[in-house]
Amino acid sequence: MFVRDSASILSAFALFLLTTVGAQAQRLPVEVHPEHYGLTVTPDLKSATFGGEETIDVVLDVPSKRITLNAAELRFGEVKAYVLPVAAYSYGKLGSQPKPLNPIEADRHPQIATVTLDGEKEQATFSFAEELPAGRVTLAIRYSGVLNDKLRGFYLSKTEARNYAVTQFEPTDARRAFPGFDEPALKATYDIAVVVDRGDTAISNSNMISDKAGPVAGKHTIRFATTPKMSTYLVAFLVGDFKCTEGKSDGVPIRVCSTPDKVELTRFALESARYVLHYYDTYFGIKYPMPKLDMVALPDFEAGAMENFGCITYRETDLLVNAKTGDIPAKKRVAAVVAHEMAHQWFGDMVTMQWWDNLWLNEGFATWMETKPVAVWHPEWNFDQDDAQGLNETLNLDAQRTTRTIRATANTPDEINEMFDEIAYGKAGAVIGMVENYLGKEVFRQGVHNYLQAHLYANATAEDFWSAQTANAHLPVDKIMSSFVTQPGVPLLTFSERQAGGVPVMQSRFFCQMGRRIRRWTDECRNGRCRCVSRRLTGRSAGC
């Protein structure tokens, strides 16, 4: 996700400092794992409501009478659990192959759940009279909700002409659009369908596979192909009269969409995306992982942009610019935000953090990466100067006594939201750039490829990332990264006069004000000679 401005970042940073250390955890039980969602959503843009029909295929590690998942501001209808205790088949004509039945087809006596809501934890518990066996269970859920005005979950986005129904789920708001296991490690595949008014269309993560009239007069149902495994916060579905500019890159269809009156302003973003996709295909050594890429400008959107897998959403000012008359700063911003979100398609969407304490790795990587392709595309735009300015701003923040560590504990939605600050973006990006500078560009790139290849469509931790770099480079990246991630600030090295045995060096934390607290960062020393690994971050390389 691209945070729109420094005010938002600093506001989140200030909130972080006020967070109570012992906040109550709101994690889900670990014994239930989702495998697949079937989701049909019917928004009513006039009444600002929506209905949902959902199936969730889950696997229970142990027998249980209860299943707990996330839900917020939703009203439940009937909830059923279907079980397939033994393999069951349907038989067609003589000689035909039997067809395996799913639990809904095979279980003629599903259990009906009693639903208990916990508003504080944003959870719903389904309780059943009889114990559900370990193994596969399918939940069938009817529910409804409100298209809210909070710019999160499933909400109304408005222009003077009409309303749109759009989504923003990161970090913990998918639960406002559908009941689910709303944690990043609980990945699953999705079959999504949206029922919309005649004349409207829908856009979602995967490509459209059907568009049929019904289920009632004046409506039509748009169905999308099954997604790869992905986290709930990356799901998206958008409804309205969007118009798009289309193109291709490396065989991947790309659309840039907006409200009809602004579609002429989508051409520069399309040009940017075409270049960036090819650049990333080459850099990562892994082809873009979705069948298409949509980028959609939304009239009301809180963040700068959001990296929904295959369906990136943007604030209009971060995607729309006149390709012929737009000024250079506006084009630079659009190109950089496009590159930031597209980097997430690999680093964040295809391979996702295990939990939000590693948000910094997702956002830091995308922040570091966002200017790379654009700087090659338009070297005359001098992105190195922008990077230097951004680094100074980050150092100013990190040199305050009230800064935080890059990795921090976050368990509740409030704590998680507070993680989206300049430390997670700017400092984390600078540290990643520091490691690239230490290893060399090609060695670092190969380490990134190895990390992604090892965790395709799965989850990983920061330790997985720097272990991949350590194994590839045969250098102590793990020790260096750990020292920068687990303590605040950056090191200041003070050199004394040369002595017979070398040059004495004192290490302390850099502050904007006088007075320092001694900490230790890992630099690399060999045979009595020290290499300042931290030189890119601190801007100090003299004497190294």
Image: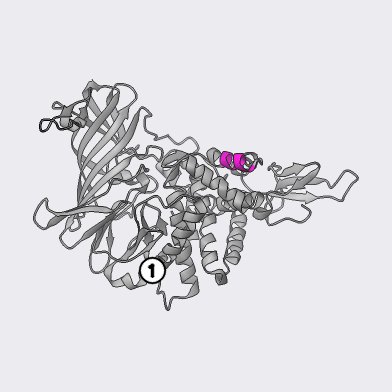
In the rendered view, tell whether residue 394 sits above or below residue 107: below
What amino acid does circle 1 point to? Leu
Q: Mark 1 points at which residue?
A: 320
Question: Does 153 sit left or right of 354 as displayed?
Answer: left
Question: Does 3 sit left or right of 48 as displayed?
Answer: right
Is 402 part of what is drawn in magenta?
no
Instruction: Please provide percent x and percent y for residue 505.
Output: 79, 46
Observer-nearest residue: 248 or 32? 248
In the rendered view, tell whether residue 61 sits above or below residue 522: above
Please give the range of residues in magenta: 466-473
Question: Does 476 sit left or right of 420 as displayed?
Answer: right
Q: Residue at x 35, y 40 (%)?
A: 182
> Which secondary structure is most common in the magenta stretch?
helix
Q: Which residue is drawn at 36% across and 48% down?
A: 234
Element class at badge 1: loop
Q: Inspect this view and state whether residue 269 appears.
A: yes
